[in-house]
Amino acid sequence: MTDGERRAARADRPKRADARRNEEALLDAAAAAFTAAGVEAPVRDIAARAGVGTATIYRHFPTRADLIIAVYRHQVEALAAAGPELLAAGPTPYAALGRWIDLFVDFLVTKHGLAAVMQADAAGFEALHAYFLDRLVPVCGQLLDAAAAADEIRADVTALALMRGVGNLCIGAEGDAHEDARRLVALLVAGLRLPK
């Protein structure tokens, strides 16, 4: 059995609740560090944020690429879960869509640098991109459909088109991605509204 097969076998085993919580805390800390300092953030900074030793990080994620991919997948899953939750809890479908798009912008900010890390593994990068689309396009579509059904937004916008537009605005605002992207994306989302 190769190292990769052993890691895959370990990943397939269900984890204890405390182990899942610890891993989630570690992934949240890594995402925060990546947002603040990019994907090259020092492992010791991530460990300090998570309240663990660096050995714990390396035990879970032997390489930086493993950690970055795990953060990416963790954030995709959180974003996928947030859509229906926001729709159920929000005052209107349009408000839920706007909040979800804000979370999507935050996600895109932490994603900067992933392509560079994955450059040597084109197939791996393509698999992650397919995973991203499979998980998030339907969620965005659900939010758009609900807002259109409530006559809050125009009905001719597809989820993929909106997500690409948001992504392009985030890339275009790289000088200060978080603030400028949020402002630009808010203008885009406001443009979806139907006149009253």
Image (spheres, rainbow, N blue to C red):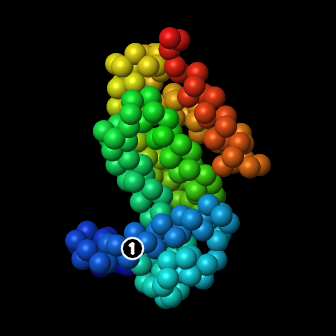
Q: Alpha-carbon neighbours of circle 1 within 10 Å: few (<14), some, or many (≥20)?
A: some
Q: Position of residue 193 (x, y in %)?
A: 52, 19
SS for callout 1? helix
Residue shown at the point (50%, 82%) measured from the top left = 51
Specify the quadrant that holds the N terminus: bottom left
**In the drawing, does residue 24 fall left or right of residue 99?**
left
Residue 177 placed where, x, y %?
69, 48
Frontmost residue, 130 versus 161: 161
- Name the foreground residue: 92 vs 102: 92
The residue lying furthest to the front in this view is 91
Viewer can see residue 134:
no
Q: Which residue is mark 1?
A: 23
**Is 195 located above or below residue 144 in the figure?**
above
Q: Quadrant of residue 9?
A: bottom left
What residue is at 55 percent from the left and 72 percent from the top? Answer: 64
In this view, 185 is above or below 115 = above
